[in-house]
Image: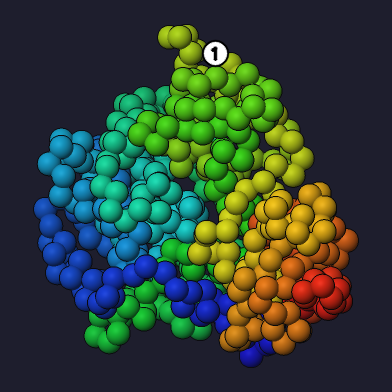
Amino acid sequence: MKPAFLLTLAFLSLAASVPAATVKDREGAVRGDKARLENDPRWNWNDIDGGFRLAKTTGKPLLVVLRCLPCMACAGIDASVLEEPELVPLLDQFVCVRIINANALDLSRFQFDYDLSFSAILFNGDGTTYGRFGSWMHQKDPLNKTTASFKKALEAALVIHQGYPANRAALSGKQGGPTPYQTPVEFPTLAAKYQSKLDWNGKVMASCVHCHMVGDAFRAYYRSQNKPVPVEWIYPQPSIETLGITLATDEVAQVEAVAAGSPAAKAGFQAGDSFVSLNQQPLVSIADVSWVLHRSPDSGSLPATVLRGGKETPVTLDLPAGWRLNSDIGKRVGTWPMRAMAFGGMKMDDLPDEERASLGLDKTQMALRIFHVGEYGPHAAAKKAGFKKDDILIQIGGLKQRITESAIIGDLLQHHLPGEKIPAVILRGKERVELKLPQQ
């Protein structure tokens, strides 16, 4: 095997083992879901092709829910979607499919936020994507059972369905783009361990490709080709908060607040605005907003239409160069393999101003405290290079300015390749130490 292949496989294996809140009996959770829902009258369990066939036959839209069962995140909304009586009239208007593993997903169709443990995609029976749903609010709170935003997404998808196919042109931007491989298990880093079907006669949990592994596989693919990681894979499905808009969590896409001085404020967005479209695409949820941003250029103009005071109002959002670098990817599970690639397994946080002052550091310069240094596999590279917990990073390559961990990851993965060793300067106590940070 090639060293790059072995390295990227190690990244994926370690990413899957990063501590996260999981159910105690992971194997039992997967088998229990099958026992409970395999013959459910509403949910087509793990049968996407059957769902599409039924959607074509009945003329109903297709709802595909993707759920990572061992992960406790989003457990509340998942339970509500399966059990809440108020959802039944809406769900009855869809062909419903439940998917619990990503092994055989058609990646040309299933392009969404792979770091979420509960997602939904809404389709026409012919394969046309109507919209996406996924909630970071639920991801962060497994006890959150509210389905308000999910209901709004289903209702919005039904409106789109009623207008189909006359609205087909407006849906073109919602469709997935080309991918290096058709399914996750065709990526070399996943093909070495996983098959297209789960191993129900063995350890089924160990045979499951989790959604976050798909994002990991894309990044590992570019890295193994000795290519920069594309910026949209470093900062996937970015939040519109990056551009200064906070959206209400219980609506499709309603502006709750606009940050002063932000691109959104300069564009004229106002609290209370409801998006009718973004980049000419109808929206069903906040996840749809992130999808538009995921596919947007690194700079340029993004047209929007909002409902303001009962009237549709055009607004143009200007994307400043490098806008994605303002994304905070620190809590994404997909960031851990990138920390190995760029940081050799370290995790760090920006020093607050008061601590900077005590150390004689300027507010405008780089100063990130290293509070985690990995010890195994690719995550031990920084330790082997001499970095230690509580070191303060004050320079990496040509970067000296105050910058977030997320932005440094993006800079290194875009501008440096595996095998390079980046000069770095750290403070260890009062001592200034020069080291070399290996890129993997």
Residue 250 coordinates in the image, percent (x, y): 35, 34
Looking at the picture, tell me which residue is in the foreground, 16 or 347.
347
In the displayed structure image, the side of residue 242 where residue 398 appears, left or right: right
Q: Position of residue 9 (x, y in %)?
A: 57, 81
Question: In the figure, 330 relative to 15: above or below?
Answer: above
Above or below, 382 against 124 in this view is: below
Residue for point 21% across, 53% down: 79
Q: Which residue is at the far bottom? A: 1
Residue that appears at 77% across and 40% down: 321
Quadrant placement of the N terminus = bottom right
Give the residue at x 57% y 46%: 238
- At label 1, the amino acid type is Thr
Nearest the eye: 407 or 392: 392
Is 133 displayed left or right of 92 in the figure? right
| Residue 170 placement (x, y as % from top left) | 50, 29
Q: Is residue 201 left or right of residue 390?
A: left
The mark total stands at 1
20 versus 153 height, above or below: below
Whether 265 is drawn above or below 332: the answer is above
In the visual, does 289 lie left or right of 261?
Answer: left
* Mark 1 surroundings within 10 Å by alpha-carbon count, few (fewer than 14), some (14 through 19), many (20 or more): some
Q: Residue at x 45, y 9 (%)?
A: 309
Give the image quarter of residue 224: bottom right
Q: Secondary structure at mark 1?
A: strand
Quarter that holds the C terminus: bottom right
Q: Residue 183: in sight, yes or no?
A: yes
Q: Which residue is mark 1?
A: 313
Q: Nearer the viewer, residue 323 or 293?
A: 323
Regarding residue 366, the answer to whether it shows in the image is no
Who is closer to the viewer here, 253 or 157? 253
The x and y percentages for residue 37 are: 16, 61
